[in-house]
Amino acid sequence: MKRSTLIFISAVFCFLKLSAEAPVPIELQGFYVGMTKQEVKTIYEKLKADAVAQHINIESETYRDRIMLDNESSSISNKIDIMYNEEGIANYITFEYKTVNILFDAAQMSAEELVKKVEGILHIPEMEFNDTGMVKTWSCIYVKEQIKVSVDESKNIRLQEMKK
C-alpha cells in the first residue's frame, strides 16, 4: 500500500473517531445544559468551599435548584436558577445579574463589555444583537448542541436547550 493511501486512511479514521465522541458542553463557571442535579450540588459545594460570596445557599426542588450568591443580605437578582427535565437533567440555567457580577467579575462592566467577555469565554466570534423595544439581548445558537446562550441588557446570562 502506498504511503499516501495509508496517511489518508489514518486521517479518515481520526476524523471519524473525533466525530463520534460526545460534544464538549457549552459551559459557564462549571454549569452547562445537560448536567445532573448531583453535578449542580458538587458545584454548589465548591462555591461554598471557595467562599466566592458572603452569602451562599441553595433551595432545591424536584425540577429546580436555586443557588443564591450575594455579598449583601438582599435576595433580589442573586440566583443561579437551574431548571430540570423529568430525567433530572438541566435544560435551562439563568445567572441573574448579581451572580454574574460575582462570578464573572462584572460589577463595573456594561452589558456590552459582558457580552464581549462571554464571547471570549465561549469562543463565539460575535453574538447576535436584538432590540425588541422592551429589552435588548445578545444571543448565539449552537446548532449542533441545540443550545442557546443569551445575555440581556441587565447582565443576566442564560443557557437553554432549544426545543427539538
Image: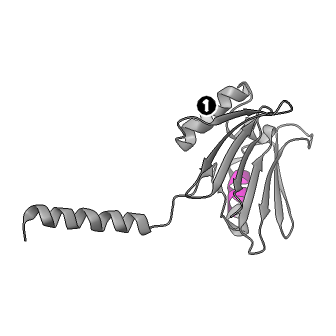
Count of numbered marks: 1
Q: Is residue 148 above or below residue 60?
A: above
Q: Residue furthest bottom?
A: 87
Mark 1, Cα crowd under 10 Å, few <14 / some 14-19 / many 20+, is: some
Q: Amino acid at mark 1?
A: Lys
Q: Locate residue 149, reporting x and y percent.
A: 67, 46
**Viewport quadrant of the N terminus:** bottom left
**Residue lying at 50% horizontally and 66% vertically, measured from the top left:** 22
Magenta segment includes 96: no
Colour theme: one colour
**Viewport quadrant of the C terminus:** bottom right
The region drawn magenta spans: 42-48
Element at badge 1? helix
Q: Can you identify the residue that label 1 sits on?
A: 116
Q: Residue furthest left?
A: 2
Q: Quadrant of residue 19?
A: bottom left
Q: Locate residue 132, reporting x and y percent.
A: 81, 34
**Residue lying at 77% horizontally and 65% vertically, measured from the top left:** 84
Nearer to the camera, 5 or 69: 5
Nearer to the camera, 154 or 30: 154
Q: Is residue 111 above or below residue 59?
A: above
Q: Quadrant of residue 9?
A: bottom left
**Residue lying at 83% horizontally and 63% vertically, measured from the top left:** 64
Q: Locate residue 117, reporting x and y percent.
A: 61, 33
Q: Quadrant of residue 13?
A: bottom left
Q: Is residue 141 left or right of residue 154?
A: left
Is the stretch drawn in magenta largely helix, strand or loop? helix
Q: Locate residue 85, reporting x and y percent.
A: 77, 69
